[in-house]
Image (tube, grey):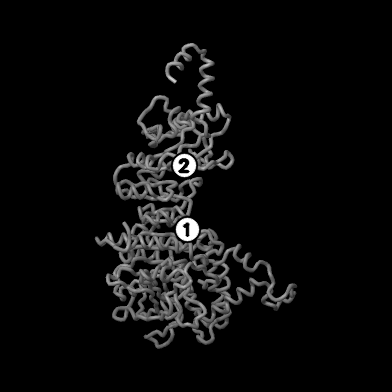
Amino acid sequence: MPSSPESTQSDSDASVGLVDVQTATLFSDRPLTLISGQQIGPVTVAFETYGTLNEERNNAVFVCHALTGDAHAAGRHSEDDDKPGWWDPLIGPGRGINTDKYFVICANVLGGCQGTTGPGTINPESGQRYCLDFPSLTVGDIVAVHSELVKHLGITRLCGVIGGSLGGMQVLDWSVRFPDQLAAAMVIASGHHLSAQGIAFNAVGRRAIHADPGFDRGNYDPAKPPQFGLALARMIAHITYLSEDSIELKFGRRLQDSDQFAFDMLKETEFQIESYLHYQGKRFVQRFDANSYLYLTRAMDYFDLAEEYDSLSAACERATARFLVISYDTDWLFPTSQSRELTSALLKVGKHVSFLELECSFGHDSFLIDIDPLAELIHPFLERTRVSEARRRGQTDPGLPG
Amino acid sequence: MGRPILVFLANATPSAISLWFLLFVSFMPVANRYQLPDISIRLTDELIMKHIDQSSRVIDLGCGDGRLLERLRREMNCEVLGVDLERSNLVSVIERGLPAVAANLDEGLQDIPTGSFDYAVLSQTLQQVKQPQELLMEMLRVARRALVVVPNFGYWRVRLEVLWRGRTPVTGNLPYQWHESPNLHFMSMYDFRDLMESIGLTIVRESPIIHGHAVDRAWAANLRADSAFYLLEKRL
């Protein structure tokens, strides 16, 4: 998902500060068997952590990033970075996910291109980049790698797992695939499947990549990627992350460089919204790999909890975590109706679930932008999970009342 | 008072009595405009809890800050769910470590699966929803029993206000005028019973609330009670 243009944050000084990307090598002894039946291993995972893991190793919160995110959720890599991590206003000392109390982990997904094994990685068997020989991926496979990383860090049970959009799908999948590994699941601007409309937009994006003359069936030189196709894919996807109102408000029908129409069919940019989309596309090409985009959008299309477990309730039945489901009123990629459907299925099988629709004009991207209302919910939800976990273990937590 | 009044009453004609009575009540107890009962939260909470079994599943519609839910959870080991529209209320419930979902009671309870609760609670809210009858049916779809507390507009002070002062009763702890009141429906205990009869619900229990006390039965309850508690079931 796009990085946030103007995040709101309550505590501007309380940052996690400078952070480093770490790597772990998993599945070296025994490869990971993917849901497709294919195997992969070893898998390198790029991840970041914030805060301190306590002695009991029970204060960890895992953050799942969205389609085009990365492990850099908070803080800065160097003093000169102009932008902090993608969910920085939410993660830090005294923030919604309070790093004074919680140990936060965020890892780049399997199949990604920001440090974790993906189609751009060298295949140890051939000595060449995987490209489209990379095995087919599902959200379940991504979660299997996350889950292994958590074990690798010596953590048996996470206090919580949180994510928005494709990240929310990972949370959901995790809660039913490895139910004992998490106490709380926070599913934001997401759903148990992508709508046909969502698949349609992904299809156009993939088509743009396929149709780029530089694509070469995925075997392009990384220095010469199918940049036109990838940029176009990003432009179309970006529209789905916004809302009619937010585009209207931000750009309206304003022209970019002139107060008159150019009447020139070769001129690409006349309206401000055009300029914005071109800019988004251009910037995206610099940081993202086209093959990864194909794999990850497919994983998103494939995800369907109801299909995998026969029904949504049957899937929910497996979960043991308490849930917090949040949607946004202007999100049309993952509309509130989907969150309601999920909530209903969880209630049907008697699970602990809270659901809210937040009001924010930024569409699907709201979860990256309007942080305060999110923090207001996540903070008490996590705190109470911690208390109930302490009770579950038969301890009392002196840090909290009742 | 006392003896002179008795003498007066013995000699007066019926019309004189009623005139004097109306003068008396209109200046003394009804000096301020009637306000809908602000039944103490403790009273309604205890009344509701009294009719709920230990360890049952309870949904509270219009749960507010979730205080009843917390008592049900702590004192009675119930599995609970709060429903409210206000974000601040939902946050309060989550702060108590309890689940809550956002819903507009005017739009029904479509997210709540059928038969997922033993009890559905609706306290002092029925008169504020657009379709009370539909909400009651919804409550008895999601739960086996419904517990409701409703104001009684058959209460004598309400009657007097309308009859004598010619004014619509003003509600609640806020001075709502008729045009800004959240209360859309005005019903008496008789009306409520009639509705239950016509939509096929059984009143398992009716407790008129008089002077801040819920009683099992009372003479002239529809005149004396400012509100009433009902335990409802679907007719078999």
Residue ID for mark 1: A338
Real-space Cα separation, disc 2 to disc 1, in angstroms: 28 Å
The local crowd at label 2, few if under 14, some if 14 to 19, many if 20 or more residues have their Cα within 10 Å, is some
Residue ID for mark 2: B125
The local crowd at label 1, few if under 14, some if 14 to 19, many if 20 or more residues have their Cα within 10 Å, is some
Q: Is residue A291 visible?
A: yes
Q: Quadrant of residue A186?
A: bottom left
Q: Residue at x 45, y 16 (%)?
A: B4
Q: Is residue A133 visible?
A: no
**Nearer the observer, disc 2 or disc 1?**
2
Chain letter of mark 2 equals B
Q: Secondary structure at mark 2?
A: loop
- Of residues B61 and A280, the one nearer the viewer is B61
Q: Residue furthest left?
A: A394
Q: Is residue B231 above or below residue A309?
A: above
Q: Quadrant of residue A282?
A: bottom right
Q: Is residue A190 left or right of residue A5?
A: left
Chain letter of mark 1 equals A
Q: Position of residue B56 (x, y in %)?
A: 32, 46
Q: Amino acid at mark 1?
A: Gln
Q: Is residue B98 above or below residue A5?
A: above
Q: Is residue B49 above or below residue A393?
A: above
